[in-house]
Amino acid sequence: QQQVKQSPQSLIVQKGGISIINCAYENTAFDYFPWYQQFPGKGPALLIAIRPDVSEKKEGRFTISFNKSAKQFSLHIMDSQPGDSATYFCAAVTDSNYQLIWGAGTKLIIKP
Amino acid sequence: DAGVIQSPRHEVTEMGQEVTLRCKPISGHNSLFWYRQTMMRGLELLIYFNNNVPIDDSGMPEDRFSAKMPNASFSTLKIQPSEPRDSAVYFCASSLALGSYTGELFFGEGSRLTVL
């Protein structure tokens, strides 16, 4: 019940295309869903986050879509660029807990 | 802002040797996390400190692993004796916890450990 399932494991998208990464969870107590971006040789860095009281959050080319009833959320990267090539992790946590539950990660490659 | 600083960035050692990884969190942050990252297991939380006190060390693999935080600006993760299966990237992260909300994690660049 504490798991966050992330898919796909890897993704190749042409430059300018839309990249979509999906995550699903079971624990309805989760109330904060961040996405982290990790470049090779670096630590993960917060990209964008959402709370379940909204269905969508957009920051530039990055959008989180949240479906509370289905217990799913996804990251959309519009107009994907080679500089977006990285590993993306979804995560979930409750405000009363410190421990992020991490997805397994998606390695995204944007082809020029 | 300097960010979270970890050292060494790379460590190659032989099985049985002691390894010490170091972390300087962001000034003012009161929570510190040690993570281990491998291809097989992804990101694993090893230990969590809040206000320099270890709150949860249930992720520490075994007694060979120990972590300390003697003050708000320094933490160490020690492996003694090291084994080849300890080879991984070890990350330190800090955050500003407000009440029960942990907030955004700021990660260091990691320490890549190879145990031969």
Image: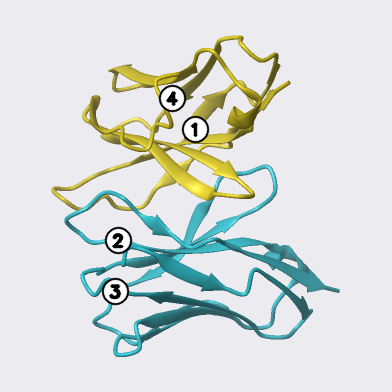
Chain colours: A cyan, B yellow
Q: Image check: A89 left or right of B85? A: left
Q: Image check: A88 left or right of B52? A: right
Marks 2/4: CA–CA distance: 25 Å
Instruction: In the displayed orientation, state which residue is furthest to the left.
Output: B99
Contact, CB < 8 Å: mark 2 with mark 4? no
Q: Residues within 10 Å of mark 2 (few under 14, many from 20)?
A: many
Using the image, determine if residue A93 lies above or below residue B16: below
| Local secondary structure at mark 3 | loop
| Local secondary structure at mark 4 | strand
Marks 2/3: CA–CA distance: 10 Å
Can you tell which quarter of the image residue A52 is in?
Answer: bottom left
Q: Amino acid at mark 2?
A: Val
Residue mark closest to the camera, 1 vs 4: 4
In percent of the image, x 62 and y 31: which residue is there?
Answer: B85
Q: Which residue is mark 4?
A: B24
Contact, CB < 8 Å: mark 1 with mark 4? yes
Quadrant position of the C terminus of chain B in the picture? top right
Query: Can residue A13 be seen from the camera position used here?
Result: yes
Can you tell which quarter of the image residue B72 is in?
Answer: top left
| Residue sitting nearer the eye, B47 or B80 | B80
Q: Image check: A66 left or right of B115? A: left
Q: Amino acid at mark 1?
A: Ala
Residue mark closest to the camera, 2 vs 3: 2
Using the image, determine if residue B35 lies above or below residue B10: below
Q: Which residue is mark 2?
A: A93
Instruction: In the displayed orientation, state which residue is furthest to the right.
Output: A112
Q: Which residue is mark 3?
A: A51
| Residue sitting nearer the eye, A37 or B53 | B53
Say which mark, if any, is on residue B2. 1
